[in-house]
Amino acid sequence: MERMADWLNELIEMLDIHSFYFLSHSWGSFVALFYAAKYPSKIKGNILIDGGYQGKRHSNQTLEEEVAFYEEDFEQVFDTWDDFLSLVKSETLNWSSAKWKAAKDLALYKDNRYYWHARGKTAGYIIQAMHKDEVEDIYQDISGNILLMKATLPERLKDHRSKTAAIFREKTNGEVLSVPGTTHLLHWDRPEAVIKEIRKRWES
C-alpha cells in the first residue's frame, strides 16, 4: 500500500498538482489513507466511501480464504451482456441509464464473452496488500479533515461495520457518517448523499 501511495504521488507530481481533494471508494480508500499518512500536506480534504475502515485483523476470513474468494469472483465469465448486467444490477439497490454506462466500464469483451475489467490475480494481490499493510497501524499518522461515509446494508454486516468504524473514528479523530439504505456501492445507491457532503465540505 505504501508503494501504491508513492506511485500515486509520482503521478500527481508529473501532473504538477500541489494539493487536491481525495474522494475514494472501497479498497481505493485504503490507498487514500496510506497516501494521507505519507503526504499529508497535499490533501485538502478526504472523503472515504465505505472503504478504509475494514481492517483485516478483524476479518472473519484468513488471507488464503479471502484471496481464493476474490480470485474466483473476478474470473467469472458471462456469455451475454444481459448476464453480466444482471450481476452488476444485483450489487446496487436501484438502476438508471447512468449506471448502465458505468457498468460498461466494468466489463471486458473478448472472444464473444464478457469478463470483469480486473482479473482475479489482480484482486488477489490487492487483498494480500491489505493484509500485509494493516491500515489500522497507520490511523494515528493521519491528520486533517476526513469523513468516512459508511454503508448500512446488508444488515448482517452491521455489528462488524460498527466495530471497525468505531476504531477508525477513535484513532483518526475522523468523522463517520452512516448513510441509510446503502450497500457497499453507496455512491450508486445514494449519489445525492455523496454530492451533498462534497458541496458542504469542499465548495466553500
Image (spheres, rainbow, N blue to C red):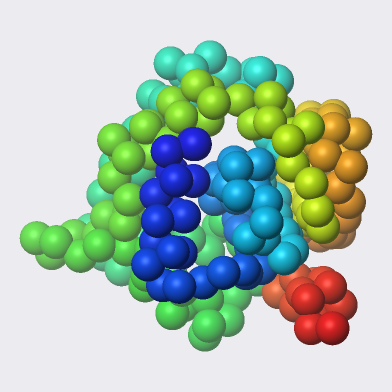
Please tell me in which quadrant of the rendered image residue 85 appears. Answer: bottom left
The answer to which of 52 and 156 lies nearer the viewer is 52
In the displayed structure, does residue 80 sit left or right of residue 34? left
Please tell me in which quadrant of the rendered image residue 38 appears. Answer: top right
Residue 14 seen in render:
yes
130 shown above or below 201: above
Residue 178 seen in render:
no
In the displayed structure, does residue 106 sit left or right of residue 135? left
Furthest toward the left, the residue is 111
Q: Residue at the spot x=53%, y=64% of the render?
A: 89
The percent position of residue 48, horizontal first and vertical second, equals 70, 55
In the displayed structure, does residue 161 sit left or right of residue 92? right
Quadrant of the snapshot with the C terminus: bottom right
- Count the numbered circles shown: 0
191 shown above or below 83: below
The percent position of residue 57, horizontal first and vertical second, equals 66, 18
The answer to which of 9 and 157 lies nearer the viewer is 9
The answer to which of 141 and 131 lies nearer the viewer is 141
The percent position of residue 149, horizontal first and vertical second, equals 78, 56
Q: Residue at the spot x=84%, y=73% of the render?
A: 201
Q: Residue at the spot x=37%, y=67% of the render?
A: 14
The answer to which of 42 and 89 lies nearer the viewer is 42
35 shown above or below 138: below
Q: Residue at the spot x=62%, y=69% of the render?
A: 20
The percent position of residue 77, horizontal first and vertical second, equals 26, 49
